[in-house]
Amino acid sequence: MVGGKERRATRRELTLSTSSAIEPVSFPSPDADGAQIGGRWIRAADGASAALVLIPDVHGVSPLYCTLAERLAAAGFGTLVLDIYAREGAPRLTDIGQVNDWIAGLPDERVLADVAGAQRYLRGRADVGTDAVGVLGFCLGGQYALMAACCEPAPAACVSFYGMLRYATRSGLKPKSALDRAPDLACPLLGLYGADDPLIPAADVAELREILGRHGKDFDLVTYDGAGHAFLNETRPEAYRAGPARDAWQRALTFLHHHLR
């Protein structure tokens, strides 16, 4: 959809599948450091397929995101769960202060180069049947998915689950927020947000909608009443909201099938 109205969502059922094998993979990053990066590849059960780069939350690759990748693979999308911490190892973060400090120290351009490297790697795999590689991400990963959709090489489609939009301050490591990059969106975007998310105020989502609409971008932003941050995260009972999670997942699958298959 070009343009975006605020929409309140209905509920649908999500089916869990765990039928695909998980394969550790590695490949070079295009970043200047030339590091080997990688993650976990889950091949679609039906052979050559469309493909996705899945960018996890701030804690990195975890069983949750491998499970979500298995669901995507069962739906026909080979999925690479990208390890953005391949160089330093995943952090152990126990409180919001540590989370904020860790995020502030992450170099955005390095992470975005890794996402670009992951897309290139997937386009070269024999079991990926198209050059149309999409990205999706969650929380910090949702932020980077949206940023990647505003960079070259752009993915074919982007799904951002509650990705943060605004930086309180800029730095050499954080030169542009997602809102700053939004005018350069280069592929269709589905953004999924909780109305009660303290990390993503409604005003930020409204500003994203205004920017994308003003620049004529192809986007759909959906906000869920009664949901906060991480509403799809089944490992966090205090955050998980079954109805919004089911609906958001179904919307993501429909969007990806439309744009990648």
Image (tube, grey):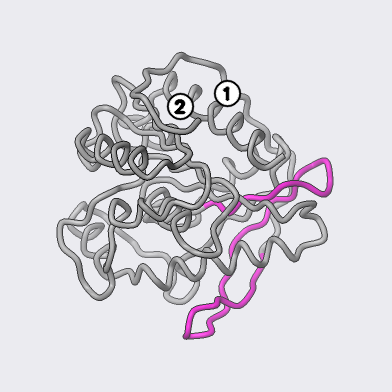
* Residue nearer the viewer, 237 or 188: 188
Query: Is 52 on the left-hand or right-hand side of 125?
Result: left
Q: Name the residue type under label 2.
A: Ala
Per the image, label 1 sits on a secondary structure element best described as loop
Answer whether residue 32 is magenta in the image.
yes
Q: Label 1, on which residue?
A: 14
Q: Quadrant of residue 207?
A: top left
Q: Does residue 234 appear in the picture of this structure?
A: no
Cα–Cα gap, marks 2 and 1? 8 Å
Q: Residues within 10 Å of mark 2 (few under 14, many from 20)?
A: many
Q: Quadrant of the C terminus?
A: top right
Residue that appears at 55% across and 76% down: 29
Q: Residue at x 41, y 48 (%)?
A: 142
The amino acid type, in three-letter code, at marker 1 is: Leu
Residues 51 and 46: in front is 51
First in sequence: mark 2 or mark 1?
A: 1
Please say whether residue 146 is one of the residues in the magenta stretch.
Answer: no
What range of the chain is rendered magenta?
25-54
151 over 192 or under it: above or below: below
List the single residue furthest toward the bottom.
Answer: 33
